[in-house]
Amino acid sequence: MIRAHAVADVREAEAALMAELPPGTLMQRAAAGLAAVCAQVLKGGLPERGGGTYGARVVLLVGAGDNGGDALWAGARLARRGARVDAILTRHDRAHPEGLAALRAAGGSVVSDPASPLGPEARRALSRADIVIDGILGIGGQAGLRADAAELAEVAAAEAGLVVAVDLPSGVDPDTGEAPGAHVHADITVTFGTHKIALLVDPAAEAAGHVEFVDIGLEPYLPEPVVEALEPGDVTMMLPYPDRQADKYRRGVLGVLAGSERYPGAAVLAAGGAIHGGAGMVRYAGPGAVADGVLAHWPEIVTGPGVEAVGRVQAWAVGSGLGDGRGADVAAALAAGVPVLADADALAYLPSRLDVPALLTPHAGELARMLGVERADVEARRWHHAREAASRWNATILLKGSTTLVVTPDGEARVNPTGSPALATAGSGDVLAGFAGALLATGLSPLDAGSVAAYIHGMAGQAAASRAGAPSASMVLDALPTVVAAMCS
């Protein structure tokens, strides 16, 4: 499990660890890890020089405080390996003194003017840089860069080589994942001790690029994480495995209320997702013509004309392609007293507060309508709005997007790391709804069902894209069994 912590927790853990170490040890650990990642990138990224650190051009963007100190000490290490290292100081009077002295002693130089960080020499250094190390702001910085630092970030993105952020991209909010102002867009972020929330939650996570973790010894001093991301082993452990005494009923029975005369394909896709989700039986409730289409694709499904007609289930997945005027059907499923997944059109028929275990799966536009805010605000403040909705409806929220976010009413949160543009296709969410609903029926909690389903759905999207480039939802559905089998092996 990838774990992310709030700034206050990181600060407390750092203080506890530093109390047991000689002064400066923690910064040296961070700088060594940062330099090692940069050296590895240079080794593979400069074929015209045969690869490696020697002769590479490195520019440090150095702010005040320890984040700038990490960059300076890492720059000194790279200079000793033969790199040409130039530092641009945003504040000459507040640069880390020991780190600056170490850089100069190793042959590095300062190319900024005290009056203006981005003078001619600094701009020339950036235009020639193979790597730019962003050490402007650390976890104690405010969201948004001031004008001079923003200009540095802009020039680095436009003219330099790879941008490597120290701990997190400067200018993003470390505790929310928001990026309301100017900020660095990194190709790689090297983070220390634990992941920061901004490295997992969009839009800041997108600005972080690829994240490299450096262990500096914080783990024993950290509390429970604020946000998590599943890894393959976690998914394997959470997937339901039938025991020797299992039968179709013990494995779980899912009811699917989806599709309509206008959207019959949604029923087929949601039912298909459910078939592959591990439940022992899937019961479909819907109009006769739509049910006939479902049976044509999935003959193992039991059908009925309505919620009451299909029999007992262990969970319901409702809403995909349901259309208008189906509030009574949604209410009947909610009244069954079993866990429920509500997707798409069902979200418009929810009561003010749910009293059964529930997983709601809106995209940003749907969540905006639920909360009465603008879609752009949801996309800019994803974690904030997901938590607000989870609390308001007493339900786990799975907010779909490039990094799907799953948040419980109690504040537990997971981010899915397997999102893919391949999933940005009509019907993809229907597949996810059926698959996650089946996991609910097997007994997984809404948090586990949502996060496992999102992970495997993302992997299926990647697998389908590897074969078709821009796959359809049906192709993503077809890839699910292979992905599940691989996770179980």
Image (spheres, rainbow, N blue to C red):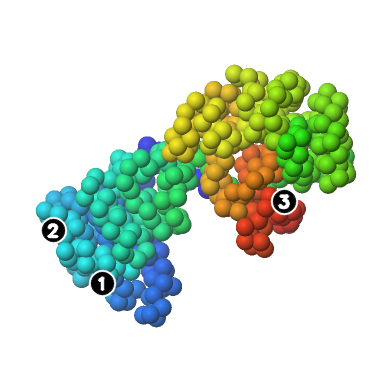
**Label 1 Cα crowd, 10 Å radius (few <14 / some 14-19 / many 20+):** many
The numbered dot on residue 474 is 3
Residue in the foreground of this view, choosing between 435 and 271: 271
The image quadrant that residue 31 belongs to is bottom left
What secondary structure is marked by label 2? loop
Q: Nearer the viewer, mark 1 or mark 3?
A: 3
Residue 142 placement: quadrant: top left
Q: Secondary structure at mark 3?
A: helix
- In the picture of the structure, the residue carrying the numbered disc 2 is 113
Determine contact: label 3, label 2, CB under 8 Å: no
- Asked whether, in this view, residue 32 is left or right of residue 443, the answer is left
Q: How many marks?
A: 3
Identify which amino acid the numbered label 1 is placed on: Arg
Q: Earlier in the sequence, mark 3 or mark 2?
A: 2
Q: Amino acid at mark 2?
A: Asp
Return the x and y of residue 105 as percentages of the image width and height. Answer: 19, 67
Label 1 or label 2, whichever lies nearer to me, is: 2
Sequence-wise, the earlier of marks 1 and 3 is 1
Q: Callout 3: 10 Å neighbours few (<14), some, many (20+)?
A: some
For marks 1 and 2, the one nearer the N-term is 1
Residue at the image position 29 percent from the left and 68 percent from the top:
129
- Residue that appears at 20% across and 71% down: 107
| Residue type highlighted by circle 3 | Ser
Task: Pinpoint residue 393: horizontal percent, then vertical percent.
Answer: 58, 23
The residue carrying mark 1 is 84
What residue is drawn where x is 64% and y is 53%?
461
- Residue placed farthest to the left in the image? 115
Query: Horizontal and vertical percent for residue 278?
Result: 77, 43
Q: Position of residue 377 (x, y in %)?
A: 44, 34
Q: Nearer the viewer, mark 3 or mark 2?
A: 3
Q: Secondary structure at mark 1?
A: strand
